[in-house]
Image: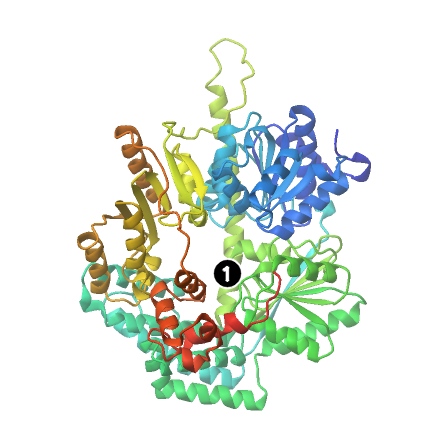
């Protein structure tokens, strides 16, 4: 026994779930804060004691993976060096060593997926694989590939999926069960008899506010504009109604349909793209007005004005020239001068003030969908004397810098310790926040997702009664999103109940098929999910390390190829001594035409590998504002002038099938060896100089030559002002600004 039983007191429902799931693949659906992790630990202890091997627990983020490791360290009687976390921050060789010596590993799924593809780890000895936040096991997410590989290779496999919200539809729930090889589902809600005694209770309140008359005037103008933008789409038969209440999904579908029509040569519909683009912009503007406020709308309209002036988008220019839009903008400016903002903001401040006055050391989390709003709310709260800190994701949004995982962890620890009372979080705070004793959770706006709504509510009511307040503007999208979320949540548990019963029936049917007539049934071995066996023909494919994110290498491995990951000098995949393949997404293919990289890459590729192939993956036409004839011209040049064949694939899986087929043809039928070419030779001084300049943002090899020719040295390129950079052909204001930013910005350790 490894678990320190003296430190825990499992509840009845945890013991029941443990007993039912310790020998069969289970999905456990349990409300947030009711001890899913402890169930995983009970099963981990049992599996290690009976089967030995290792336990692997996956979590979507590094902070969550580290949090799980700390829990195992606290409750398991194992040396610290036997319990470790694997993330991309460790070098590949270090991860291999950590895996070898560990008994319990917590990890991020992308890291494990990459190490599986490259052969650095083997899941054969893992006796328990835990998928935290198991609702993510859909589509091409890393959980799906890892589960498939595990169930194929493990000697004593057991899967445990943990989630508070598996998905809003029966179809999605079925997909999760299939992808994880689930044989049994354990569901508990706050109303379950064995859970009810432990539920502290979460009081949910819906606070509605009335939009001011000025807001309604702006909204009326924007809705008129939206109606006029939708009317040509209705007349063309693209939509059934030009009501401004048409769902956003419908407008998006029109955009996809127009792209397909234009790609097929139906240019008569080209004029409709401008109306679809205008409709999308107006829809977003109305959503900002209704759910966020005039300050958010003003910032967005300012962005549209800039886009229109610079000629980036015709739709923005047309919109901002309309007298109704100018009137709306004038009203927005007037509201700003009057100090008028969304009434939800003042209501939020009232709620926070009241909570902090009612209880000393209270903790409050405010959720909002928009980073701009989170910034405004935190600023205003601090101006009121209430210390509030933002909690946002890692990606940067213009000047708004993202937070790395180290910073996120630091903020959560300070919040837990009571260093500040209010955390203002975007969606990054919805999943896996381990913050005890949160007294109040405020939704600044409802979310139309059942999963996100459940995750947000789960931040309170863990150890004592909690309170959730949902702010809504009356008669707006706020109300529509709220009711959408409610319907989806109710439907989710109904669907879950149906799927759970279906799994039980299928399991019973599969077991009775083993019973012989008139004989006592024999105990049958545990059924393992059936997966297609890989082709073990032994082809080898060299893969560029940057391609791991594409998903193609893992599909190659599933097909039975030996995947050797290296940093390739040319090409993305090498399948024979003279055959290399360049994979490009549709968007990347078009971008490489725009910035001049395409034919430079083809030159290097053909020089190293006489039989080069290009695979274009995904949609090509309509994904960028580039005329189809320009794309066709580039394709024709590749085929005719460069003699490079072009293959088209739907997705990463089909790309892998093409590569595997070519590899088999070359290595098995023609008996060709696989070897790498095109290794970089010692660079000349000029080559080194060009390489340094190519490291600047959006600077291709051609542009690097132009810069060096214009300025005469690397030093002058790096000291040039934005205005001087813009004198060089191919460099506009945006590119010049990005180059100067990289050169002058202070370096900060990530």
Q: Residue at x 44, y 38 (%)?
A: 564
Q: Nearer the viewer, residue 248 or 50?
A: 50
Instruction: Name the residue: 30% across, 68% down.
Output: 625
Q: Nearer the viewer, residue 455 or 219?
A: 455
Q: Nearer the viewer, residue 281 or 508?
A: 281
Residue 587 is left or right of residue 189, and the answer is left
Q: Is residue 101 toward the left or the right of residue 722 in the image?
A: right
Q: Is residue 474 visible?
A: no
> How far from the left and from the top, in percent, is residue 600?
30, 58
- Give me the residue at 35% from left, 66% from top: 251
Q: Residue at x 70, y 60 (%)?
A: 410
In the picture, which quadrant includes the C terminus?
A: bottom right
Quadrant containing the N terminus is top right
- Secondary structure under the numbered disc 1 in the rendered image: loop
Q: How is the image coloured?
A: rainbow
Q: Is residue 86 left or right of residue 385?
A: left
Count of numbered circles on the image: 1
Q: Identify the residue under disc 1.
A: 448
State the image coordinates of residue 661 (x, y, percent, origin top left): 30, 36
Does 2 sit left or right of 274 as displayed?
Answer: right
Q: Quadrant of residue 16?
A: top right
**414 w.r.t. 50: above or below:** below
Residue 321 visible? The answer is yes
Q: Position of residue 35 (x, y in %)?
A: 69, 44
- Tell me residue 433's x, y (percent): 65, 55
Residue count near mark 1 (Cα–Cα under 10 Å), binned few <14, some 14–19, many ≥20: many
């Amino acid at each position: 026994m490894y678990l320190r039983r003296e430190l825990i007191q499992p509840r009845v429902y945890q013991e029941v779930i443990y007993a039912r799931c310790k020998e069969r693949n289970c999905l456990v659906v349990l409300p947030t804060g009711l001890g899913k992790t402890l169930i995983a630990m009970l099963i981990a202890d049992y599996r290690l004691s009976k089967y030995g091997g290792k336990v692997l627990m996956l979590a979507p983020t590094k902070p969550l993976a580290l949090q799980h490791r700390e829990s195992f360290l606290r409750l398991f009687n194992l040396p610290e060096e036997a319990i470790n976390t694997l993330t991309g921050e460790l070098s590949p060789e270090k991860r291999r060593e950590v895996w070898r010596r560990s008994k319990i590993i917590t990890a991020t799924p992308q890291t494990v997926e990459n190490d599986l593809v490259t052969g650095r780890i083997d899941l054969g000895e893992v006796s328990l694989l835990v998928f935290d936040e198991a609702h993510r096991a859909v589509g091409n997410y890393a959980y799906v590939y890892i589960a498939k590989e595990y169930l194929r290779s493990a000697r004593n496999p057991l899967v445990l999926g943990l989630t508070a919200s598996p998905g809003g539809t029966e179809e999605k729930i079925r997909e999760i069960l299939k992808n994880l090889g689930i044989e049994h589902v354990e569901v508990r809600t706050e109303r379950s008899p064995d859970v009810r005694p432990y539920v502290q209770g979460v009081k949910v309140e819906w606070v509605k506010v009335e939009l001011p008359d000025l807001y309604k005037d702006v909204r009326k103008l924007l809705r008129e504009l939206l109606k006029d933008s939708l009317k040509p789409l209705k007349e063309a038969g693209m939509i059934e109604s030009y009501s401004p209440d048409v769902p956003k999904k419908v407008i998006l579908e029109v955009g996809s349909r127009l792209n397909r029509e234009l790609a097929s040569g139906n240019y008569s519909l080209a004029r409709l793209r401008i109306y679809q683009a205008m409709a999308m912009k107006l829809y977003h503007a109305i959503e900002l007005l209704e759910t966020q406020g005039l300050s958010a709308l003003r910032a967005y309209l300012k962005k549209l004005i800039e886009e229109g002036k610079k000629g980036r988008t015709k739709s923005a220019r047309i919109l901002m020239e309309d007298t109704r839009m100018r009137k709306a903008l004038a009203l927005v400016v007037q509201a700003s001068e009057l100090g008028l903002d969304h009434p939800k903001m003042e209501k939020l401040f009232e709620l926070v003030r009241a909570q902090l006055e009612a209880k000393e050391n209270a903790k409050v989390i405010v959720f909002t969908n928009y980073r701009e709003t989170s910034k405004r709310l935190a600023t205003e709260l601090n101006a009121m004397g209430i210390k509030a800190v933002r909690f946002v994701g890692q990606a940067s949004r213009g000047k708004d810098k993202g937070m790395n995982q180290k910073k996120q962890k630091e903020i959560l620890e300070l919040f837990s310790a009571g260093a500040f009372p209010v955390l203002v979080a975007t969606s990054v705070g919805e999943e896996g926040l381990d913050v005890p004793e949160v007294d109040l959770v405020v939704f600044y706006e409802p979310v139309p997702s059942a999963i996100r709504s459940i995750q947000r509510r789960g931040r309170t009511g863990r150890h004592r009664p909690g309170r959730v307040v949902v702010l809504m503007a009356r008669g707006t999208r706020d109300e529509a999103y709220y009711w959408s979320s409610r319907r989806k949540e109710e439907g989710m548990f109904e669907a879950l109940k149906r799927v759970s019963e279906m799994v039980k029936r299928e399991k019973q049917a599969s077991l009775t098929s083993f019973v012989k007539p008139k004989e006592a049934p024999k105990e049958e071995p545990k059924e393992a999910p059936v997966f297609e066996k890989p082709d073990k023909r032994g082809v080898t494919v060299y893969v560029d390390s940057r391609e791991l994110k594409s998903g193609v290498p893992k599909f190659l491995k599933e097909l039975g190829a030996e995947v050797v990951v290296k940093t390739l000098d040319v090409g993305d995949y090498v399948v024979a001594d003279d055959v290399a393949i360049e994979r490009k997404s549709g968007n990347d293919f078009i971008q490489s035409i725009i910035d001049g990289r395409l034919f430079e890459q083809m030159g290097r590729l053909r020089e190293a590998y006489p039989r080069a192939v290009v695979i274009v993956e995904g949609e090509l036409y309509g994904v960028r504002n580039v005329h189809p004839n320009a794309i066709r011209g580039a394709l024709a040049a590749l085929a005719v002038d460069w003699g490079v064949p072009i293959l088209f694939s739907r997705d990463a899986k089909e790309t892998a099938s093409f590569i595997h087929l070519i590899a088999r043809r070359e290595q098995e039928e023609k008996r060709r060896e696989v070897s790498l070419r095109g290794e970089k030779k010692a660079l000349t001084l000029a080559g080194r100089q060009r390489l340094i300049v190519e490291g600047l943002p959006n600077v291709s090899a051609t542009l690097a030559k132009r810069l060096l020719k214009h300025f005469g040295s690397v030093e002058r390129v790096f000291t040039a002002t934005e205005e001087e950079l813009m004198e060089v052909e191919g460099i506009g204001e945006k590119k010049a600004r990005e180059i100067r930013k990289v050169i002058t910005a202070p370096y900060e350790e990530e």
